[in-house]
Amino acid sequence: MTSVEADWDRAPSLVDGAMSVELTPRRANLRYWLQAVPQGTLLGRPDGHDPALSVPEFMREPGPLRDALRAEYAFRSVAEEKATRALSYLVAIAPDTDTLEFYATQVLDEARHAMVFRNHLLSLGVPEDNLWQAIEAFAGADVHAVLDPLEELGLKVMRDDADFLGGVVLMTIVIEGALAPAAELSERKWRPLDPAAAEIDRGAGIDEIRHLTVGAAIAKQCLEERPGEKDRVLDLIRRGMHLWTVLPVQDLVLRREVLFQRGLEQHAAVVGDYEIWPGRRLVDTTPEERTATAERWSAEMKASRLAYIGLEEAL
Ligand SMILES: [Fe+2]
Ligand SMILES: [Fe+2]
């Protein structure tokens, strides 16, 4: 018996789920996770996807499609690893059992995401003994330009200042919240080309619904108990959002989509009439349209989560 929001077939999409599911740390404790995730979402999918799905041969051949997915998964694998390490500081300073258990499960979720993205690079033909050098080659520049500054801010708040509420808000609104829509886009666009990758994204998306909704519930509860913290938290959100505007994120995402587009044109026959969203064939979309859609999702999700927490002034 699994919870609908963690059920492989019945869970909503990440973007819908993050705006409609309500989940508290009281409910999403360790016991919930054991049933919902290892015995639910992950049942039969230890590598994040149905083991019967293999990577199509054309994804392993040199070309823009392989380059796009390798760059994306290398980057996301490093992002997940950084999240794993940073979130362990929230476990250390969690104020009660519910939040301690929840963040302990999130640490495992993020370590698992790092693993499945990294392992998929092997499925794409990257030799195992060369994996870390390959990750650096595929995504190192983007990691240093985008992830390192975000990590620095996260570690300052969670590790140096031991600021639990600040860390929760930073993860929920600024870091994961902003990256989540790109993950949903990824699932939708890789579906017809690399179904195993799409399943990896789907599984990570189901976990992300939980991370975003429980994180928001924790922040809301902390702020209700300590309303005097609100200005400080708003200030932190504004600092985080400012960071996104100065980091070269748009450039990175667009570059990835342009590569994907070249691959999409080469393999249009495989994609056929597949619709990326209702009424829109993937082959008819452009890099700009796809990135603009992910940005719109991001803005909608952020507004909805901020309103739920009671921090709408941040917008
Ligand atoms: Fe993750
Ligand atoms: Fe997450």
Image: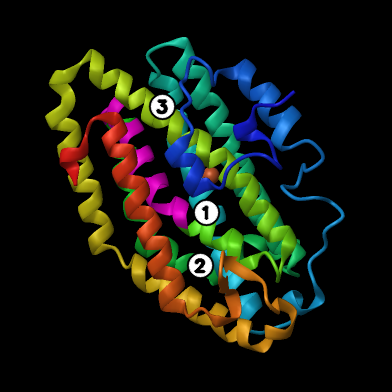
Q: Is residue 31 above or below residue 308?
A: above
> Residue 138 at what x, y percent from top left?
55, 71
Q: Cβ(mark 2) to ligand 1 < 8 Å?
A: no
Asked which secondary structure carries label 3, the reply is helix
Residue at screen point 67% across, 31% down: 37
Q: Earlier in the sequence, mark 3 or mark 2?
A: 3
Q: On the rendered structure, is 314 left or right of 90?
A: left
Q: CA distance from mark 1 to mark 3?
A: 19 Å
Report whether residue 47 is seen: yes
Could you say which quadrant of the image residue 117 lies in? Answer: bottom right
Residue at screen point 67% across, 58% down: 198
Q: Considering depth in this image, is 8 or 64 the residue closer to the camera?
A: 8
Q: Cβ(mark 3) to ligand 2 < 8 Å?
A: no
Q: Are marks 1 and 2 in contact (CB under 8 Å)?
A: yes
> Residue 177 at what x, y percent from top left?
39, 46
Badge 2: few (under 14), some or many (20 or more) residues near its Cα, within 10 Å?
Answer: some
Q: CA distance from mark 1 to mark 2?
A: 9 Å
Q: Which residue is mark 1?
A: 78
- Magenta residues, start to end: 161-181
Q: Which residue is mark 3?
A: 90
Q: Is residue 123 above or below residue 205?
A: below
Q: Earlier in the sequence, mark 1 or mark 3?
A: 1
Q: Amino acid at mark 3?
A: Leu
Q: On the rendered structure, is 240 left or right of 112?
A: left
Q: Considering depth in this image, is 293 or 83 the residue closer to the camera?
A: 293
Q: Which residue is mark 2?
A: 139
Q: Amino acid at mark 2?
A: Ala
